Image (cartoon, helix red, strand yellow):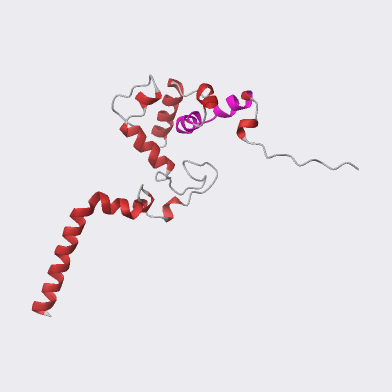
Amino acid sequence: MGEIPPQKPTSLTDLPTELHLHISSYLPYPDALALKHTSRHFYALVYTGVHLKVDWLVERFEQKLECPMEKCSFRTDEAFCNLRIRRIMERRRRHLECRRRAGGCLVVAGRTCQGDLVPAWLKRKGGLRGVVFRFGNEVLVLGMLFLGVYLLWGLVFG
């Protein structure tokens, strides 16, 4: 009897282009943009045009999530991804917009996101080190001031 030869694992790139187009048509703008920037093949294939951007903003508005209200340029991805949009996308990637609800996470439908078990300031870029870096000198000076007052209070009235 003949043995079944081992099959190599298949990946997304092994699928036909028609399936790539079909799969990418279901992606919201941030996911389509991320897929678009994974390879030259997907860059030429994935649509991230005006309709997808508008649909994404309308969906965010309906979910009562932050939407940029200032003027947005929809001509190119680079022009559309201004500082405000990039911050929204970064928060979305880190699941900072997720709230527990019956249907799951706002970012990953169908699964419950456990993102709110970790404080948001720890999930930000840099974690605790980023918080100290961002507020570094002010926090250090105020902490030393309060420590000095506490020790002085203990010496005088203790």
In magenta segment, residue 4: no
In the image, residue 58 above or below residue 115? above
For the view shown, which residue lies furthest in the left direction?
Answer: 156
Left or right: 6 in relation to 123? right
In magenta segment, residue 19: yes
Whole-percent x, y for residue 150 in the image: 15, 71
Give the quarter of the image for residue 79. Answer: top left
Left or right: 100 in relation to 10? left
The kind of secondary structure the magenta stretch mainly shows is helix
Question: Which of the two residues, 76 or 51, is positioned nearer the viewer here?
Answer: 76
In the image, residue 9 above or below residue 51? below
Identify the residue at image location x=34%, y=52%.
121
Identify the residue at image location x=13%, y=76%.
154
Does residue 66 show up?
no
Identify the residue at image location x=47%, y=30%.
37
Which residues are drawn in magenta? 18-37
Give the quarter of the image for residue 15. Answer: top right
Which quadrant holds the C terminus?
bottom left
Q: How many marks?
A: 0
For the view shown, which residue lies furthest in the top direction?
Answer: 75
Does residue 147 show up?
yes
In the image, residue 86 above or below residue 114? above
Whole-percent x, y for residue 3 in the image: 85, 43
Question: Which of the two residues, 13 or 74, is positioned nearer the viewer here?
Answer: 13
Whole-percent x, y for residue 63 in the image: 42, 37
Which quadrant holds the N terminus?
top right
Whole-percent x, y for residue 133 in the image: 26, 51
For the view shown, which residue lies furthest in the bottom direction?
Answer: 158
